């Protein structure tokens, strides 16, 4: 269904008829559907009011539905205001193409003055220009050319329109673009122009991949114009102010039903805010986590979209096509929930990732320095662990790292032992405080990076206190066995910590998160994919608390003593094991039916009269004691 719009005198009928003939569709003129009263008014030079137009537009809306059901049509209709176009939009937006014929006031006035046999008084033109509201979803065509040329431009613009746009041709943007284009999505890409620094980035990318048939832009309105409405635009730019400034630039260029998808690692609170702000402009918004790094982006990432469900349904085929597939061939992409829920779970995903990485670093240090094992011996040990239910992407890359040499020497030994943390790790910790949720392993993994980053201080302190690390004096094989069991226990606890915080967020924000489905989309494509994650898909069908599942109660119950033993031995021998120890502390705190918090409550009441609850009185009552 095609509507040719514009003020009077732009040639809607002529162009519409040519287009209808070309496309073998019936042609209709909206003026033929005016009630008699409107025609009289127009002929006598009086402009129509909105209440005059209402019944006329409603008649047209009904006709459009019928025409579309019968194979489509071309309708010439002024459709000047957005609310008129809304009344006409009785069919899904993807079935409706709007073509706006535009020209200057002077040009159109000149044309109208030569017109004969038409009931419209040219004096009405002025009021029409005043009424005209930009239609961002329309294909824009200038009338300053012959009708045949206008037709050619329309046909070429209609056929060249792309279905999806990506902004930000960095590492992720480029690889996702290649993935999408390989999946036959017609694509526009944009990268900002910064004179002398970032020039022709998108065009160079397109030129490098001619077979993909992608259109590249460094002009934002040309980029927007290149896409068929309703537009789907994925932002792959740095989280933070860059996302806000791109959204600010895009908003005036977009129309109702257009969709912005933020695929960067944005803070979920920012996503909540943007979701509300864009709703005021009738622009759909989705905040999605995308995990898998460069390779995942190109070959199949795990995708975690949150926001408008209707908008998700529209773009689901695009996202599910490019996503990794689970063991059953289903896409590792699902609608997560409203608002910033997609970015929230991506943040927790990364938090779990921080702690999983730190656990492997601690295991490595205990084996390498505590037991004095060679890198290849450690790699072989970890390969054995893979066969014991501990297989994971992170374990696999750790084994590869232990074998990577440079000039005959282990590359790992040349890498500075200082890691930074940015964004998601710290945000997870902040979210835990905001939600009142324990996040021991993840918070300690963030702190471990912070202490590692203080290389100079650590070196100076090391000289001050001397060598504290000692060889671990224990039967080597039994220590390795305990370490494997302790590592397994710590991983279970770490996953429980992350999922428990998502459960808390789901309750407090009313998101209705599905933990089995979240585990499922994390079984492939993402960094924390593992055998444990695959098992969790089923565990979360039975319970929404991982540590309450009977299979977990059994295995963790058996392994927790090994974790305690390893932590004790490591600390006594001078090795920091923040996340192994944190997992143990979380576990003991979690299973502690009678904690020491009664002492805290007594202290708080003692110095601050904060009151306390009693175990021998109803919990609805509070008590205070004069302690001295
Ligand atoms: P990147 O390679 O550094 O690329 C960033 C892109 O953002 C570039 O195209 C850059 O344009 C653009 N940009 C930066 N500031 C901008 C601004 N003010 N206005 C407009 N464009 C701006 O980053 P990336 O690795 O692709 O990551 C993109 C997003 O995905 C980030 O949020 C990141 O956290 C997230 N992410 C990354 C990974 C990963 O493994 N790399 C994985 C998952 C998610 P210029 O080239 O002109 O500077």
Image (cartoon, grey):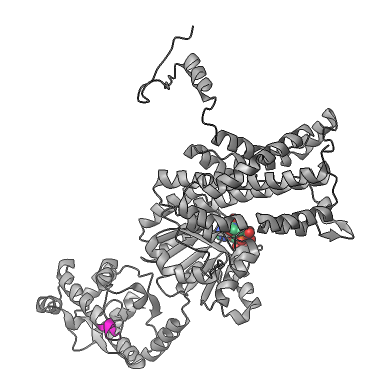
Q: Position of residue 415 (x, y in %)?
A: 80, 51
Is 217 inside the magenta-drawn segment?
Answer: no
Judge from the rendering whether residue 83 lies leftward or rightward of residue 627; answer left or right.
left
Q: Is residue 39 visible?
A: yes
* 597 lies left or right of 556: left
Residue 440 image offset from top left, x and y in percent: 59, 39
Relative to 565, residue 91 above or below: below
Residue at the extreme right? 408
The quarter of the picture showing ligand 1: bottom right
Q: Is residue 449 left or right of residue 366?
A: left
Q: Nearer the viewer, residue 89 or 446?
A: 446
Report whether 252 appears left or right of 431: left
Quarter containing the N terminus: bottom left
Figure disc tally? 0
Query: Viewer-proximal residue, 252 or 209?
Result: 209
Q: Nearer the viewer, residue 334 or 385?
A: 385
Q: Is residue 223 visible?
A: no
Query: In the figure, 49 relative to 549: above or below?
Result: below
| Residue shown at the point (90%, 60%) measured from the top left | 408
Give the magenta part as a residue range. 67-75
Vertical order, 127 against 447 (above or below): below
User: Which residue is found at the position 68% from the left and 40% from the top?
Assistant: 563
Residue 334 at what x, y percent from top left? 47, 62
Q: Depth check: 182 or 59 in front? A: 182
| Image location (x, y in percent) of residue 107 | 33, 80
């Amino acid at each position: 269904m095609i509507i040719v719009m514009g003020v009077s005198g732009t040639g809607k009928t002529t162009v519409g008829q040519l287009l209808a003939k070309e496309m073998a569709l019936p042609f209709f003129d909206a003026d033929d559907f005016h009630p008699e009263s409107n025609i009289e008014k127009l002929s006598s030079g009086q402009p129509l009011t909105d209440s005059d137009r209402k019944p006329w537009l409603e008649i047209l809306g009904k006709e459009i539905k019928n025409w579309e059901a019968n194979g489509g049509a071309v309708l010439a209709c002024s459709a000047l205001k957005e609310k008129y176009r809304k009344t006409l939009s009785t069919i899904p937006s993807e079935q409706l193409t709007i073509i706006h014929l535009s020209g200057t006031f002077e040009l159109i006035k000149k044309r109208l003055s030569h017109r004969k046999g038409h009931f419209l008084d040219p004096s009405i033109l002025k009021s029409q220009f005043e009424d005209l509201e930009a239609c961002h979803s329309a294909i824009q065509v200038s009338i300053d050319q012959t009708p045949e040329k206008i037709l050619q431009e329309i046909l070429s613009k209609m056929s060249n329109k792309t279905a999806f746009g990506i902004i930000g041709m960095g590492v992720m943007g480029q690889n996702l673009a290649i993935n999408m284009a390989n999946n036959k999505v017609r694509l526009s890409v944009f990268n900002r122009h910064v004179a002398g620094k970032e020039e022709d980035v998108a065009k160079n990318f397109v030129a490098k991949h001619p077979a993909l048939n992608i259109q590249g832009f460094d002009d934002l309105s040309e980029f927007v114009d290149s896409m068929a409405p309703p537009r789907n635009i994925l932002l792959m730019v740095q989280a933070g102010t860059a996302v806000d400034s791109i959204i600010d630039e895009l908003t005036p260029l977009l129309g109702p039903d257009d969709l912005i998808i933020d695929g960067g690692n944005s803070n979920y609170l920012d996503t909540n805010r943007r979701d509300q702000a864009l709703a005021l402009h009738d622009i759909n918004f989705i905040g999605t986590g995308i995990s898998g790094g460069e390779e995942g982006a190109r070959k199949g990432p795990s995708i975690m979209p949150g926001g408008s469900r209707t908008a998700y349904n529209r773009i689901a085929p695009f996202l599910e096509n490019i996503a990794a597939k689970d063991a059953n061939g289903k896409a590792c992409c699902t609608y997560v929930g409203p608002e910033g829920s997609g970015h929230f779970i991506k943040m927790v995903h990364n938090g779990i990732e921080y702690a999983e990485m730190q656990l492997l670093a601690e295991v490595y240090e205990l084996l390498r320095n505590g037991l004095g094992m060679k890198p290849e011996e450690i790699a072989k040990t970890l390969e054995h662990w893979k066969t014991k239910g501990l297989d994971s992407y992170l374990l696999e890359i750790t084994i590869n790292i232990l074998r990577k040499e440079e000039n005959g020497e282990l590359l790992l030994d040349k890498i500075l032992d200082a890691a930074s943390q940015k964004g998601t790790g710290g945000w997870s910790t902040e979210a835990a405080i905001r939600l009142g949720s324990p996040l021991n392993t993840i918070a300690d993994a963030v702190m471990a990076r912070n202490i590692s980053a203080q290389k100079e201080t650590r070196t100076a302190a090391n000289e001050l206190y001397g060598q504290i690390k000692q060889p671990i004096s224990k039967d080597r094989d039994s220590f390795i066995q305990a370490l494997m069991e302790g590592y397994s226990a710590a991983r279970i606890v770490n996953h429980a910590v992350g999922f428990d915080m998502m459960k808390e967020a789901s309750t407090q924000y009313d998101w209705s998160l599905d933990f089995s489905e979240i585990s499922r989309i994390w079984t492939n494509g993402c960094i924390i994919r593992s055998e444990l994650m695959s098992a969790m898909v089923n565990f979360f069908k039975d319970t929404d608390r991982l540590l309450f599942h009977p299979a977990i109660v059994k295995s963790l119950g058996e392994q927790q003593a090994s974790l305690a033993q390893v932590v004790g031995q490591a600390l006594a021998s001078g090795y920091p094991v923040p996340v192994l120890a944190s997992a143990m502390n979380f576990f003991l705190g979690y299973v502690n039916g009678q904690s020491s918090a009664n002492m805290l409550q007594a202290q708080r009441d003692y110095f601050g009269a904060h009151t306390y609850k009693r175990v021998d009185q109803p919990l609805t009552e509070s008590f205070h004691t004069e302690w001295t």
